[in-house]
Amino acid sequence: MFGPSFKYVAYIECSTPDGKRQLQVCKDKKIKGYPTWEFADGSRLSGQLPLNTLAEKTGCQLAK
């Protein structure tokens, strides 16, 4: 979805390597589903979001 721009995403893996449990860092933040997007204003959205929604929430401009 992000292609080479993924390197700009602050990403934290929540699943253990076997995919059966959740890491403590995500339990502490009460992450319930994936992906969960946490924004600078403290708001959160879950699930796969359209790029225009992410652009609006982050102030990033989409390339045309």
Image (cartoon, rainbow, N blue to C red):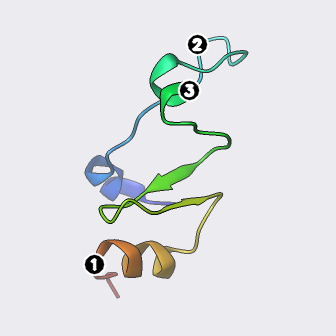
- The kind of residue tagged 3 is Lys
At which x and y percent is residue 19? 68, 19
At which x and y percent is residue 56? 39, 82
Q: Which mark is residue 17?
A: 2
Left or right of 33 in this view: 14: left
Tag 3: Cα neighbours inside 10 Å, few (<14), some, or many (≥20)? few
Helix, strand or loop for disc 1:
loop
Assign the C terminus to one quadrant of the image: bottom left
Q: Which mark is residue 3?
A: none
User: Hey, which quadrant is residue 40 in on the image?
Assistant: bottom left
Q: Nearer the viewer, mark 1 or mark 2?
A: 1
Q: Residue furthest bottom?
A: 64
Verify CB contact (< 8 Å) between mark 1 and mark 2.
no
Label 2, label 3: how far apart the Cα atoms are: 16 Å
Left or right of 48 in this view: 4: left
Q: Residue drawn 45% across and 63% down?
A: 43
